[in-house]
Image: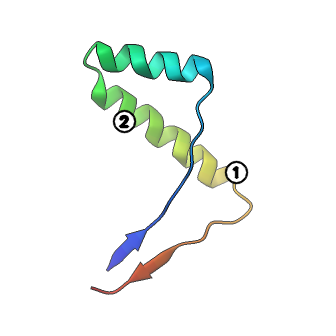
Amino acid sequence: MIVKATIKLELDDSQKNWVSYVREQGGEEAVFHYLEEEVQKKIELADSVEMEYKDK
């Protein structure tokens, strides 16, 4: 099964600055987890979530 989801996540200037700083310091994993949490918040606050999937 293939699941495809597209989410647009807009960061404010302070979030962008934090992400840039942490990435420069080699904190790719920390940035990934932060963005993952932000996406999860968007999903929880959404009025609806649409997903499309196909069996392989």
Q: Quadrant of the C terminus?
A: bottom left
Which amino acid, by three-letter code, is at mark 1? Leu
Q: Report x, y in % for residue 43.
A: 60, 54
Circles 2, 1 touching at the beta carbon (< 8 Å): no
Specify which label sits upstream in the sequence, 2 or 1. Answer: 2
Q: CA distance from mark 2 to mark 1?
A: 20 Å
| Closer to the camera in the image, 40 or 24 | 24
Q: Report x, y in % for residue 16.
A: 52, 23
Q: Report x, y in % for residue 38.
A: 54, 39
Which image quadrant is residue 12 in? top right
Residue at 54% x, 54% y is 7
Residue at 69% x, 66% y is 48
Residue at 38% x, 29% y is 31
Which secondary structure, mark 1?
helix
| Closer to the camera in the image, 33 or 4 | 4
**Pointer 2 local density, CA inside 10 Å: few below 14, some 14–19, many at least 20:** few
Q: Does 38 appear above or below 13?
A: below
Q: Which residue is mark 2?
A: 32
Q: Residue furthest bottom?
A: 55
Q: Does 8 appear above or below 52?
A: above
Which amino acid, by three-letter code, is at mark 2? Phe
Residue 44 shown left or right of residue 40 in the figure = right
Residue 47 shown left or right of residue 43 in the figure = right
Kindly identify which numbered label has been placed on residue 21: none
Q: How is the image coloured?
A: rainbow
Which image quadrant is residue 13 in? top right
Residue 26 shown left or right of residue 40 in the figure = left
Residue at 48% x, 17% y is 18
Q: Which residue is mark 1?
A: 45
